[in-house]
Amino acid sequence: MLYWTVIFLVVAIIAAVFGFGGIAASAAGIAKILFAIFLILFVISLIMQLLGGRGTPPL
């Protein structure tokens, strides 16, 4: 997911350089949303890892 965030950010920067304001704003908005989702999932996975411990021991 972080890969797609970087892709949309690069598209936004390139579009802004060439003067396509609407496309740049849309791509930047999508990049922000994807980055926020990535951060939320990352924090949830960290919390689950801390609360879960090491799991069951092998047999």
Image (tube, helix red, strand yellow):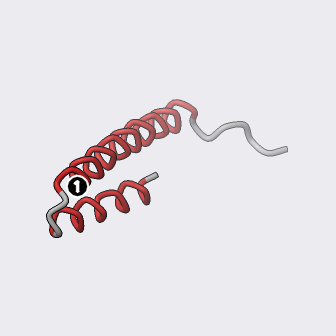
The image quarter containing residue 14 is bottom left
**In this view, 10 is above or below 4:** below
**In this view, 5 is above or below 18:** above
Residue type at mark 1?
Ala
Residue farthest to the top?
Answer: 51
Direction from residue 12 to residue 58 in the image, left or right: right
Residue, x 72% and y 37% (percent of image)?
A: 56
Count of all numbered marks drawn on residues in the image: 1
Q: Position of residue 33 (x, y in %)?
A: 33, 40
Q: Quadrant for the C terminus, please.
A: top right
Direction from residue 19 to residue 12 in the image, left or right: right
Residue, x 74% and y 41% (percent of image)?
A: 57
Residue, x 57% and y 32% (percent of image)?
A: 52
Residue, x 39% and y 36% (percent of image)?
A: 40
Q: Within 10 Å of the Cα at label 1, are there few (<14), some (14-19), or many (20+) other Cα atoms?
A: many
User: In terms of depth relative to the viewer, which is nearer, 1 or 19?
Assistant: 19
Q: Position of residue 9 (x, y in %)?
A: 29, 59
Direction from residue 58 to residue 18 in the image, left or right: left
- Residue tagged by mark 1? 24
**In this view, 56 is above or below 13:** above
Q: Is disc 1 placed on a helix, strand or loop?
A: helix
Q: Position of residue 45 (x, y in %)?
A: 49, 39
Direction from residue 51 to residue 8 in the image, left or right: left
User: In terms of depth relative to the viewer, which is nearer, 30 or 2?
Assistant: 30
